[in-house]
Amino acid sequence: MPTFLAFLRAVNLGPKRVFPKDDIRRVVESLGFEGVATYINTGNVRFTTPMRSRARIESTLEAAFAADRGFDVPTIVFTQTEFRSIAADVAELAAAHPGLARHYVSLLKDELSSAQAAAVEATSGDVGRMVVRGRAAHALLGDGYQSGEVDPLAATKLLGIATNRTHTVVTAVAERWC
């Protein structure tokens, strides 16, 4: 069975959207998925399933999460190969831009059109640069961006359904699960 990685959007960000990793694991296992593991409490989960369709896996997970939690949990799924490629891009971009203050990766539910990707990259400015590669958009932030601000380039609204992870989390997940 193939192994997939899922990334949940907007969980554990406050008192109303709580979804502990043990509960995530329980819900995924209740669907009959196997080899379920979570990493930190930001909505990262690995599993195997005989399902092949990414859209079907995402909709199955989203329905189960909503039923369990009572709120929508957008879910973005990658194969191990796809995620390994994103991690390789993270390493390449970090090497090409030494001294970044922060490197956020927006994991996208759907690949952007070339026009959408160009619009995202056009948000680049003095504090940083946006780079779109496949289903990931990288915010490469230099000194001068407001510390703690995840979207200083105002690109998030152009990405569609996405969830953010730091380059450190992307690298750690890839090392553990890919």
Image: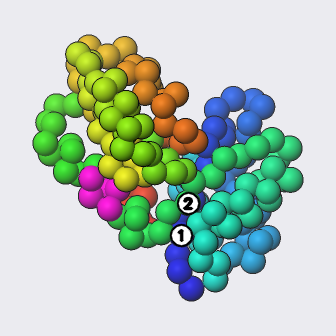
Q: Is residue 49 left or right of residue 149?
A: right
Q: Quadrant of residue 145?
A: top left
Q: Quadrant of the C terminus?
A: bottom left
Relative height, residue 68 to residue 163 (above, below) = below
The amino acid beneath tag 1 is Phe
Rendering coords of residue 2 (x, y %): 53, 80
Q: Who's the residue at 49% across and 47% down the image?
A: 108
Q: Who's the residue at 22% across and 31% down the image?
A: 100
Mark 1 — residue? 4
Q: Who's the residue at 55% across and 38% down the image?
A: 160
Q: Is residue 155 left or right of residue 101?
A: right
Q: Would you call the spot at circle 1 few (<14 residues within 10 Å), some (14-19), or many (20 or more)?
A: many
The amino acid beneath tag 2 is Val
The magenta stretch is 85-89
Secondary structure beneath dot 2 equals strand
Rendering coords of residue 140 (x, y %): 28, 32
Secondary structure beneath dot 1 equals strand
Residue 77 is tagged as 2
Q: CA distance from mark 2 to mark 1?
A: 7 Å
Q: Who's the residue at 63% across and 63% down the image?
A: 55
Q: Is residue 71 left or right of residue 132?
A: right
